[in-house]
Image (cartoon, grey):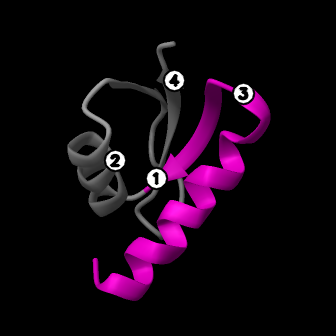
Amino acid sequence: MNSIEIEKFECFLEDSFREGNMLRELRLSEQEIEFLSKKYPRANLKKIKANDNSDEKVWYEVSFSR
């Protein structure tokens, strides 16, 4: 991911977990999963649905422990 994509993805994550929400279902690409895992090593990622779209994104349950 380039710097602009990273910035957009970080804003997306910030919006997704706003107001103390610690669990979300998100469609993520392999690059986004890799970035998320490196930046937030304590994040829990669980695949919940196989890829059924051509954009290569997969549904994951993403949670952060308090």
Mark 1 or 3 closer to N-term? Answer: 3
Mark 1 or 4 closer to N-term? Answer: 1
The residue to which callout 2 is attached is 36
Name the residue nearer the viewer: 60 or 36.
Answer: 36
Local secondary structure at mark 4: strand
The residue to which callout 3 is attached is 20
Mark 4 or 2 closer to N-term? Answer: 2
Q: Position of residue 38 (x, y in %)?
A: 20, 45
Q: Which residues are magenta?
A: 1-28
Residue 28 bears which disc, if any?
1
Local secondary structure at mark 1: strand
Residue type pointed to by label 1: Leu
Residue type pointed to by label 2: Leu
Q: Splitting the image into 4 quarters, where does residue 56 fall?
A: bottom left
Q: CA distance from mark 1 to mark 4?
A: 14 Å
Residue type pointed to by label 4: Ser
Local secondary structure at mark 2: helix
Please tell me how crowded label 1 is: few (under 14), some (14-19), or many (20+) other residues with Cα within 10 Å. Answer: many
Mark 3 or 4 closer to N-term? Answer: 3
Q: CA distance from mark 3 to mark 4?
A: 11 Å
Residue 63 bears which disc, if any?
4
Q: CA distance from mark 2 to mark 1?
A: 10 Å
The verdict on residue 22 being magenta is: yes
**Residue drawn at x 47%, y 14% as measured from the top left:** 65
Q: CA distance from mark 1 to mark 3?
A: 21 Å
Tell whether label 1 touches label 2 (CB within 8 Å). Answer: yes
Q: CA distance from mark 3 to mark 2?
A: 18 Å
Tell whether label 2 touches label 3 (CB within 8 Å). Answer: no
Residue 53 bears which disc, if any?
none
Tell whether label 3 touches label 1 (CB within 8 Å). Answer: no
Tell whether label 4 touches label 1 (CB within 8 Å). Answer: no
Mark 3 or 2 closer to N-term? Answer: 3
